Image (tube, rainbow, N blue to C red):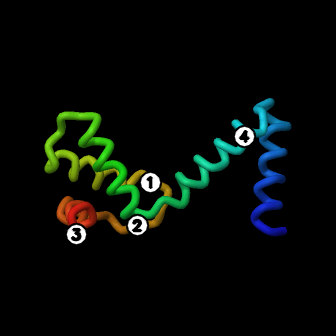
Amino acid sequence: MDDLQTDQALSRFICQTSGLDERRANRIITEVLAFYTETVNDFVRRRHAELKNETDMRNADIFRVIAKEIETRPFRAEPVSERQVRRIIYG
């Protein structure tokens, strides 16, 4: 079974079991897949931008928060230091 057939089967299953329409089921599938396939670097960059835009936190605090959040994410990653977070963001 190829990915398209799998996605269609999953979409039908979610529609049948949840009562959601196909558009909403597909949106949920897309969001869940994005959650589980995000890389550590992508996560760090996304969260840094979110925290910068949505809070008045300073970078030092943001780096600390992100380093702790990485421990709870569903990707395999060694713990990272605040310095490593800063390097991911700024190179």
- Residue depicted at x 72% and y 38%: 23
Q: Residues within 10 Å of mark 3 (few under 14, many from 20)?
A: few
Name the one closer to the observer, 39 or 27.
27
Give how far across and how far down residue 58 sits, in percent. 14, 43
Instruction: Identify residue for label 4.
Output: 25
Residue 73 has which mark? Answer: 1
Q: Residues within 10 Å of mark 4 (few under 14, many from 20)?
A: many
Residues marked 2 and 1 touching at CB (< 8 Å)? yes
Residues marked 1 and 4 touching at CB (< 8 Å)? no
Name the one closer to the observer, 59 or 76.
59
Instruction: Determine whether the residue tagged by mark 3 lies in a helix, strand or loop.
Output: loop
Give how far across and how far down residue 31 sits, in percent. 58, 47
Instruction: Determine whether the residue tagged by mark 2 lies in a helix, strand or loop.
Output: loop
Instruction: Identify residue for label 3.
Output: 91
Q: How far is the residue under mark 1 from the one under mark 4?
A: 23 Å
Q: Residues within 10 Å of mark 1 (few under 14, many from 20)?
A: some
